[in-house]
Image (spheres, rainbow, N blue to C red):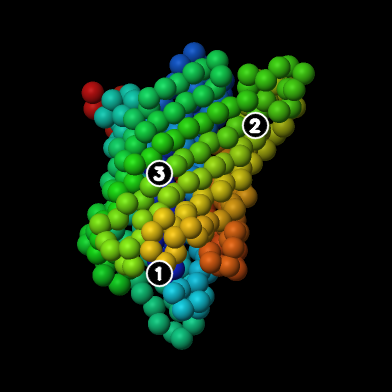
């Protein structure tokens, strides 16, 4: 149940969730399954904009970027993040996540520690296999005061979110090379318990554009590509945040993240660049690296089984 939002000028924040297995591309299921699978479409667990699926999984991610603080000085920010998602029912999942953050400023100062714990719930409300469409709703809560004082905010942030995904496999056969394309997106307000000068409210929104090589090979034309190319999904993510209150009202920050994800039945690996969209976000390109495990495929009868 990953979201992207800018907490303060000195800090970038992401939370983490959901995924898929490449073997599901072969299943041709008529309904949504574990992970973000609908019909023949598999939406991978992207790194900055959450997918619309629910699943039993664990995400581990590393990020590095230089971002400006409130004085305009660049700060090196390194994060190691985790998220664990647990299916309550086949359509409802609970998540818990946090980041270990290391910040280093040019004058030699630094701050290290855990960010606030984020808990969440996501419910799959609709899936249409024929049109490769699915939609979910969720709520994330970053609990103020649960992290290190030098890193985390003292206030809480609540984010009700809508998630969607649409594959283009329903295009006519004459447009076969376009059928592996898919888009996903999220939108939701970040509502804080602080005053607008300390923690202004914002609107988090994001889109991804994906091209699935597994889908191309299994549903359009088998090109005979060898591994690891046969399981790759090139992706571009657009995680954004628009301030809605305080002195920053109307200002948008975010990044453009081109990258690639490699899928397997039991997990995935991914890498992306983070390119700031404007000077308020920064002037330096960052990087995200992801490892994601599908518990519901590895342990379908135990750890990865829904509670109910």
Please tell me which of labels 3 and 2 falls first in the chain: 2
Q: Pinpoint residue 45: horizontal percent, then vertical percent.
A: 48, 39
Please tell me which of labels 2 and 1 falls first in the chain: 1
> Which residue, given by chain and number where applicable, does mark 3 sit on?
188
- Toward the viewer: 276 or 47? 276
Q: Closer to us: mark 2 or mark 1?
A: 2
Q: What element does badge 2 sit on?
A: strand
Q: What element does badge 1 sit on?
A: strand
Residue at 35% of width from left, 71% of height from top? 112
**Label 2 Cα crowd, 10 Å radius (few <14 / some 14-19 / many 20+):** many
> Which residue, given by chain and number where applicable, does mark 1 sit on?
102
Please tell me which of labels 3 and 1 falls first in the chain: 1
Q: Pinpoint residue 218: horizontal percent, then vertical percent.
A: 65, 22
Q: Is residue 43 visible?
A: yes
User: Is 111 situated above or below 25?
Assistant: below
Alpha carbon separation for disc pair 2 and 1:
37 Å
Residue at 40% of width from left, 82% of height from top? 109
User: Is 234 situated above or below 42?
Assistant: below
The quadrant of the picture occupied by the C terminus is top left
**Label 3 Cα crowd, 10 Å radius (few <14 / some 14-19 / many 20+):** many
> Which residue, given by chain and number where applicable, does mark 2 sit on?
181
Residue 210's label in the rendered image is none
Q: Is residue 269 visible?
A: no
Residue at 56% of width from left, 19% of height from top? 131
Q: Is residue 104 left or right of residue 157?
A: right
**Label 1 Cα crowd, 10 Å radius (few <14 / some 14-19 / many 20+):** some
Residue at 48% of width from left, 58% of height from top? 250
Alpha carbon separation for disc pair 3 and 1:
27 Å
Q: Pinpoint residue 288: horizontal percent, then vertical percent.
A: 52, 55
Q: Are marks 3 and 1 in contact (CB under 8 Å)?
A: no
């Amino acid at each position: 149940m990953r979201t992207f939002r800018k907490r303060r000028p000195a800090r970038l924040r992401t939370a983490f969730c959901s995924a898929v297995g490449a073997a599901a591309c072969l299943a041709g299921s008529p309904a949504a399954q574990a992970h973000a699978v609908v019909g023949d479409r598999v939406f991978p667990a992207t790194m900055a904009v959450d997918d619309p699926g629910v699943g039993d999984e664990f995400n581990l991610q590393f990020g590095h970027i230089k971002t400006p603080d409130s004085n305009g000085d660049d700060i090196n920010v390194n994060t190691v993040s985790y998220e664990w998602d647990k299916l309550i029912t086949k359509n409802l999942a609970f998540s818990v996540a946090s980041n270990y953050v290391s910040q280093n400023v040019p004058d030699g100062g630094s701050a290290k520690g855990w960010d606030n714990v984020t808990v969440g719930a996501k419910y799959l409300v609709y899936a249409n296999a024929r049109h490769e469409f699915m939609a979910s709703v969720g709520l994330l809560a970053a609990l103020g005061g649960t992290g290190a004082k030098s890193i985390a905010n003292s206030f809480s942030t609540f984010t009700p979110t809508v998630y969607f995904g649409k594959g283009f496999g329903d295009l006519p056969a004459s447009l076969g090379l376009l059928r592996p394309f898919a888009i996903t997106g999220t939108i939701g307000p970040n509502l804080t318990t602080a005053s607008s000068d300390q923690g202004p409210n914002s609107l988090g929104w994001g889109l991804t554009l994906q091209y699935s090589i597994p889908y191309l090979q299994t549903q359009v034309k088998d090109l005979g590509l060898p591994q690891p190319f046969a399981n790759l999904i090139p992706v571009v993510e657009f995680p954004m945040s628009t301030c809605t209150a305080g002195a920053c009202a109307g200002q948008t920050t975010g990044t453009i993240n081109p990258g690639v994800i490699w899928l397997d039945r039991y997990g995935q690996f991914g890498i992306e660049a983070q390119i700031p969209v404007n000077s308020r976000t920064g002037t330096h390109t960052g990087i995200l690296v992801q490892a994601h495990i599908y518990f519901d495929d590895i342990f379908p009868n135990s750890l990865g089984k829904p509670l109910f």
